[in-house]
Amino acid sequence: MRALKASFHSAAFSSNLKRVKSYSPNSKVMAVLKANAYGHGLIEAARALNDADGFSVLTLSEAIELREHGFTQHLLLLEGFFKPYEVKICSLMGIGAVIHHAQQIDYINQVKPVKPIDVHLKVNTGMNRLGFMPKDVDLILKQLEESPYINKIVIMTHFSDADGEKGVASQLACFNEIKGIDIYERSVANSAAIIKYPETHFEWVRPGIMLYGASPFDDKTGNDFQLKPVMSLRSEIIAIQTLEESQSVGYGSVFTAPHKMTVGIVACGYADGYPRHAPSGTPLMVDGVITQTVGRVSMDMLYVDLSSLPNAGVGSSVELWGKGVLVDEVARQSHTVGYELLCAISASSRVPMEYQHG
Ligand SMILES: *Cc1c(COP(=O)(O)O)cnc(C)c1O
């Protein structure tokens, strides 16, 4: 059997949840579990994060799965209803929904659900992706308040630049100016805002990436915020090559040996979710020692410099990312973010997942 697998450390999850709570001690936590919990497995992630006050997901089927597994927390559909029939199921199963356009309110009024629905009213304060314009919120709130089909209303918005230079000031000011907002619970902070902007914490926070132990800032790592990596991606060396000076390894001959050297062939490639754009020099660990990739990542394999590991051979263990090499470092080398690398592992059906409890 191919050795590549992803391990998930549930103790790291609970530790990261505690970090969220220490940043925002007075807020309820809506853990973001979309995209199969950023690649980590929806149900296992929810189990490890059982102390969260709520879970948010993208699709109704994910929310149903959580209910069927007995989770009693608040559940939230981050993009709300796509079709009217979903209203009925949400009502029956006590699943809340984001309302970000007027048609979603029409769906509720058409379906006339038996049990009124909890909603998060989404306001577009400048990201210009989803949500009502602030000037329209007053009227929408009146409609929602008058509807017998709506239960609790939370007001939310989402930041475009909490992790960047621009920051949250203008969006937050826009949010705070909404008429009558103080009587509602508010939910605005993603991981970057939880860490950097305490004034955004309000009644609810919505952490995603930090729960998985990675950094929301592309110039920092999870370590910088005492977050613990939940996922380790590990494999083994399946062959050894000796390159003479000026010989190459892999497609395109993009790496040429500066001197005679030993190279390990690792069972992990871009079809598994490892980034093809990771250049020569991307860190990884062999037998517990940090070394680096050489050559271009292929579909099923990548190559590692074994110059400093004379005892490594076929069967030597390789950590692509995890505790020794942070996913944030691999992401930075590959000009992407930890979010994309973690999600890609779940998108690949080739990597078995192993759950480690305690
Ligand atoms: C994904 C998402 C989050 C979590 O963002 P992180 O940067 O992973 O913390 C929060 N809110 C909404 C609406 C999201 O879509």
Image: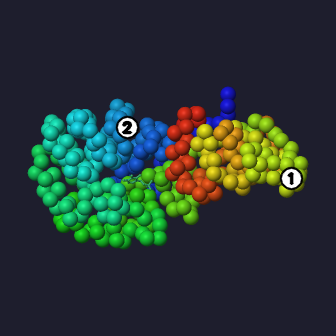
Q: Which amino acid, mark 2? A: Glu
- Mark 2 nearby-residue class (10 Å; few <14, some 14–19, many ≥20): many
Q: Residue furthest front?
A: 252
Q: How many marks?
A: 2
Q: Which mark is residue 246?
A: 1
The image quadrant of residue 132 is bottom left
Residue 186 higher or lower than 52, as above or below: below
The structure residue drawn at horizontal position 72% and vertical position 55%, both measured from the top left corner, is 281
The structure residue drawn at horizontal position 77% and vertical position 52%, both measured from the top left corner, is 255
Whether residue 203 is visible to the viewer of this picture, yes or no, is: no
Coordinates of residue 334 in the picture (x, y in percent): 62, 55
Residue 251 higher or lower than 138, as above or below: above
The structure residue drawn at horizontal position 47% and vertical position 70%, both measured from the top left corner, is 165
State the separation of the CA atoms marked 2 and 1: 52 Å
Left or right position of 284 against 87? right
Q: Say what secondary structure mark 2 lies in.
A: helix
353 or 28: nearer the eye? 353
Q: Which mark is residue 197?
A: none
Where does label 2 land, which residue?
62
> Which quadrant: the N terminus?
top right
Q: Residue furthest top?
A: 1
**First along the sequence among labels 2 and 1:** 2
Left or right position of 191 against 182? right
Q: Which amino acid, mark 1? A: Ser
The structure residue drawn at horizontal position 29% and vertical position 45%, both measured from the top left corner, is 80
Coordinates of residue 173 in the picture (x, y in percent): 30, 71
Coordinates of residue 299 in the picture (x, y in percent): 65, 39
Does label 2 point to a residue whose CB lies under 8 Å from ligand 1? no
Colour mapping used in the image: rainbow
The image quadrant of residue 125 is bottom left
